[in-house]
Image (spheres, rainbow, N blue to C red):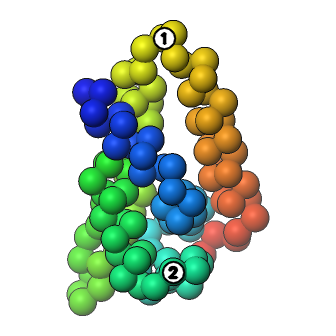
């Protein structure tokens, strides 16, 4: 992974709504835009744009299920590869940020029961 790709991952995770969407997909598995829109305070169109930004960064992908598009958190989300692209002299500044991001994802997954 090139450094530019790592920047895209970090930029995508830097937005609160996108972070909430990744947390939701992590906690509840694949979901439609309709279901994802229920959990955030933005329009369906905004959710679509956020998901497209996350997809461009390699964090999520979608598949069609009839007329609906189902969004899935990518198994290989690019974070590990992004860390490897950061020069070791700067990693000490980035690890606390990544720790906070992962803590938020874990807390969201813990607070929200998995959809059946």
Picture layout, residue 94 above or below residue 102? above
Viewed as shown, does residue 63 lie left or right of 23? left
* Mark 2 → mark 1, Cα distance in angstroms: 37 Å
Q: Which mark is residue 56?
A: none
Viewed as shown, does residue 54 lie left or right of 24? left
Nearest the viewer among 114 and 25 is 25
Q: Residues within 10 Å of mark 1 (few under 14, many from 20)?
A: few
Nearest the viewer among 105 and 45 is 45
Secondary-structure class at tag 2:
loop
Sequence-wise first label, 2 or 1: 2
Task: Find residue 64 and report its horizontal and vertical position in percent.
Answer: 24, 77
Task: Find residue 69 and report its horizontal and vertical position in percent.
Answer: 29, 78
Q: Residue furthest bottom?
A: 67
Which residue in the structure is indicated by mark 2? Answer: 42
Res 7 visible: yes
Q: Residue furthest right?
A: 111
Residue located 48% across and 11% down the image: 88
Task: Find residue 67 and report its horizontal and vertical position in percent.
Answer: 24, 89
Viewed as shown, does residue 52 lie left or right of 9? left
Nearest the viewer among 110 and 3 is 3
Residue located 24% across and 87% down the image: 66
Res 76 visible: no
Quadrant where the C terminus sits is bottom right
Image quarter of residue 38: bottom right
Image quarter of residue 3: top left
Secondary-structure class at tag 1:
helix
Which residue in the structure is indicated by mark 1? Answer: 88
Residue located 60% across and 23% down the image: 93
Picture layout, residue 44 above or below residue 11? below
Quadrant where the N terminus sits is top left
Q: Residues within 10 Å of mark 2 (few under 14, many from 20)?
A: few
Task: Find residue 35 and report its horizontal and vertical position in percent.
Answer: 49, 83
């Amino acid at each position: 992974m090139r450094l530019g790709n790592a920047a895209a991952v970090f930029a995508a995770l830097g937005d609160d709504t996108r972070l909430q969407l990744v947390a939701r997909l992590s906690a509840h598995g694949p979901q439609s835009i309709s279901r994802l829109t229920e959990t955030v305070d933005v329009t369906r169109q905004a959710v679509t744009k956020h998901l497209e930004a996350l997809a461009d960064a390699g964090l999520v992908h979608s598949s069609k299920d009839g007329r609906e598009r189902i969004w899935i958190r990518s198994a290989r989300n690019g974070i590990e590869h992004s860390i490897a692209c950061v020069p070791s002299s700067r990693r000490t500044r980035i690890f606390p940020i990544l720790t906070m991001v992962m803590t938020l994802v874990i807390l969201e997954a813990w607070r929200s029961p998995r959809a059946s």
